Image: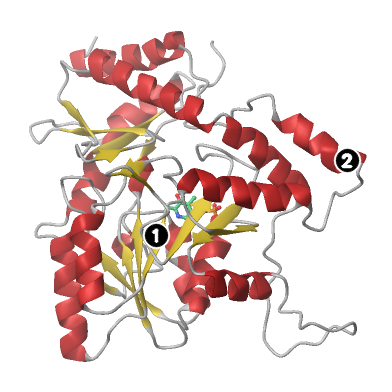
Amino acid sequence: MHERIYLSPPHMSGNEMKYIQEAFDSNWIAPLGTNVDKFEEEICAYVGMDHGLALSSGTAGIHLALKYFDVGPGDYVFCSDLTFAGSCNPILYQYANPVFIDSEPETWNMSPIALEKAFEWAKKENKMPKAVIIVDLYGQSADYDSLLPICEHYGVPVIEDAAEALGASYKGKKCGSFGHIGIFSFNGNKIITTSGGGMIVSNDEEAIKKMRFWATQSKEVSRHYEHKEVGYNYRMSNICAGIGRGQLEALDTFIQCRKNINELYRESLSDLALSFMPVKNNGSPNYWLSVVKFTSNAILTPDDIIVPLEEENIESRPVWKPMHLQPLYKKYSFFSHGESISELLFHTGICLPSGSAMTTEEIQTVVKVIKRIFYGT
Ligand SMILES: *Cc1c(COP(=O)(O)O)cnc(C)c1O
């Protein structure tokens, strides 16, 4: 049997060791160091933001952003419903209440219709959120021209969870730059990885300064370790940042690889009752994952594809299980687009292997299994 085909495994560019070696040569393994400073600068330059803060994870970034917007016990935070739990777990860290917002069919991202409904409810019930977390799903930008004016109208700041969308853009502007604060993840499965890590970006220098302070245990300026506020150990190591610098140099190549994979899947699966995550023409995704869903007349379930792929040593996954269906989150409010789009996508969607190092042969292996299922041969 062929080697396992993973959903989105790490893909080293070859430049990572150079930066790690530099850290070793100067014995600057930790704390922080040149690679961290440079990685922050390089990500900012790439995304077009003024300030960056390298962290131990993307989740840590969302936590600090919520704290910056003073989210505390009993507060409300709106969040995309169709996402990974890392987007909303920090809301619970702050003992606040998440309110989940459904997807729209056009981008699978946050629905402006559901968002407006949620704001009208919040206004009536006196439950205005302290922040709105908008996710750029599977590497595609949310529709910010529709979403941002609604948030502005109600005067609520936006945290852009671009964990999956580094390198994607919307009307020529890079993802991560649409909210007051943007967040990236460099977890092992993301388009670039530092083995584990994250970054906050913002044009608000004071905000970054404050979050940097909290991320380093809130140490006051003093020799004797003075503390007035609670802090966190959330910074990135100089070794991890070295991996990140090497990865960032290859990001545009990785995006091209994933785009090619997406195109090959589209061509090869075009005659089946499957449709791909729609790409809105004013956006340019990073194609992190190629995701398909059954067209409405199909009678299969995601497991009908996922299980046979697994039998061939191929990893695929259902679309994220919507947060409002999770045991942990089902007691919180949810606002739907009409019929719930996130639920529909969960029941009909499959994430296909999309790693940037995937070979044409591996793609054809995946395609062959899927075709066999549809044709029943
Ligand atoms: C991966 C991911 C996160 C969490 O990032 P970590 O670095 O794993 O903490 C948050 N939100 C989304 C949408 C993600 O995909």
Is residue 261 shown above or below 288?
above
Which quadrant is the C terminus positioned in?
A: top left
Q: Is residue 275 left or right of residue 79?
A: left
Residue at image position (37%, 19%) is 260
Q: Nearer the viewer, residue 10 or 70?
A: 70
**Residue 110, position as x, y percentages in the image:** 25, 57
The alpha-carbon separation of the residues under discs 1 and 2 comes to 35 Å
Is residue 121 shown above or below 262?
below
**Residue 22, position as x, y percentages in the image:** 84, 38
Q: Is residue 192 left or right of residue 171?
A: right
Specify whether residue 334 is in view.
no
**Circle 1 sits on which residue?**
160
Res. 216 image quadrant: bottom right
**Circle 2 sits on which residue?**
24
Mark 1 belongs to which amino acid? Glu
Mark 2 belongs to which amino acid? Phe
Res. 308 image quadrant: top left
